[in-house]
Amino acid sequence: MRVTIDKPSFHSRSLSVPAPPTPPPEALGLNLPGFDTFKANFDLPLTPVTPPPEYKEHPFSHNDRVRDLSPVVDPNDQPLVAVIGVGYVGTHLVESFSAHYDVLGFDVSEKRIGEIREELPSERIRFTTSKTDLHEATHFLISVPTLLKADKSIDTSYLQSAIATVAQHARPGSTVVIESSVAVGMTRGLLGPVATAHGFYAGMSPERVDPGRIEPPCHAIPKIVSGLDDEIPGSLASVMRLYNQVFDRLVPVSRTEVAEMMKLYENCQRMMCIAFANEMADACIPHGIDPYEVAAAAASKPFGYMPYTPSLGVGGHCIPVNPYYLLSNSAFPLLEAAAEKMNARPAAIARRAIDSLTRDAKAGAASALVRPRVLVVGVGFKAGQSVLSNSPGVDLVKAFVSSGEVDVIE
């Protein structure tokens, strides 16, 4: 594979990236001095290396793989991509990579495996809960949840378990990529030592899946890729060789920490903008103006403004959680304040609604005899989604119920 990297206004250089060797991997070096100051020229297509064009015509043959399995992964082996964790993100990875490679979807949940077998029937895909099946794979994409504990500290138990499973069953020469959102430095801290000890290439490529969004498709979203090349030379080349077949545009960055920070920065920026829109909405109330009209009018500006509208809050597995990944080892005073305000918003909206209902009840003798009832329509974490993970709608219902002043209908 030949990658051309341009540095604007200076010069371009062409790097021939050799195929990854068998472990130990130090024989392969991807010498990119000053890589962080260069800009990839995405107008030049990356030359496909694996799989060969005719490969996608062949069905997934488990028996052939077991028979031909070597003790060490060779770069010329037909790739078998194992997706570790087939929840929402993992399902998208299975769909995307199975268009080009054989894919093994692994999950510890028998229930989830049964569901996804029906969702994605394909000769190119096999689903399993058996860890021993992972020995066949050449590449591993880890897409398990990274959650928060009750004290807002990061719960890495799923990620550590996934890495341990890969370490136990993967062959030397395998490539392991973390797709889950993690704190800055976590790929190096958790995956790095394991990859070095077992002869794996290691990388980080944060997922950019948006639940409920159809366009653009997953393969059309620019894909950030990184490798632990300073510890395991050749990692970035190995990651790019695999991902180049799947995504329309790769955006290589110099270190895994850059990829980690990028993911958290883009998600937390969204949360902070929503928090600011909410503050604007609150400020509109005493002036008797409509905040949505304000937002719509502001959106007419064709530059220097990104439209955001007020809302109850943010939900899902990413936006409300990611601020605490950044705050775990960095100082972000504005982000911390925005996260606190966002967490408190459902209860504040409930209190505002209850006070309004109480005033209306006191205004008329007849209505004063009737206990207010509140209908909450839609409690998914965002429009078009029935998932309740970190849903501000659920927090709103809880706030109404805990007040004891209204009856709630969902």
Image (tube, rainbow, N blue to C red):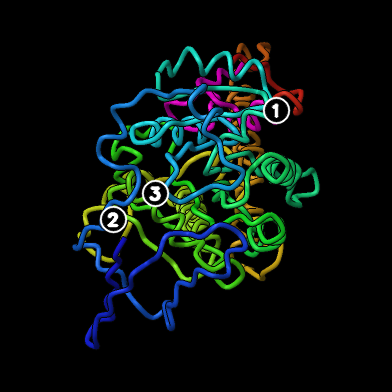
- Residue at image position (49%, 65%) is 234
On screen, residue 68 above or below 230: above
The answer to whether the residues at label 3 and label 2 have Cβ atoms under 8 Å apart is no
Query: Residue 148, how many percent across, how many down?
Result: 72, 45
Q: Which is more N-terminal, label 1 or label 2? A: 2
Give the residue displayed 69% in from the left and 54% down from the top.
Answer: 198
Residue 265, visible in the rendered structure:
no
Earlier in the chain: of badge 3 and badge 2, it is 3
User: Circle 1 sits on which residue?
Assistant: 398
Q: Nearer the viewer, mark 1 or mark 3?
A: 3
Q: Amino acid at mark 3?
A: Tyr
Can you identify the residue that label 3 sits on?
243
Q: Is residue 156 above or below residue 100?
A: below
Q: Secondary structure at mark 1?
A: helix
Residue count near mark 2 (Cα–Cα under 10 Å), binned few <14, some 14–19, many ≥20: some
In the image: residue 69, left or right of residue 219: right
Element class at badge 3: helix
Q: Nearer the viewer, mark 3 or mark 2?
A: 3
The local secondary structure at tag 2 comes to helix
Q: Amino acid at mark 1?
A: Lys
* Quarter of the N terminus within the rendering: bottom left
Question: How far apart, in angstroms, are the residues tagged by discs 3 and 2?
Answer: 39 Å
Vertical arrangement, residue 130 with respect to residue 29, above or below? above
391 in magenta = yes
Check if mark 1's residue and mark 3's residue have beta carbons within 8 Å. no
Please name whichever residue, 212 or 223, is drawn nearer the observer in this view of the structure.
223
Q: Which residues are magenta?
A: 373-399
The residue that disc 2 covers is 298
Report the side of 1 relative to 129 (left or right): left
Q: Position of residue 163 (x, y in %)?
A: 69, 46
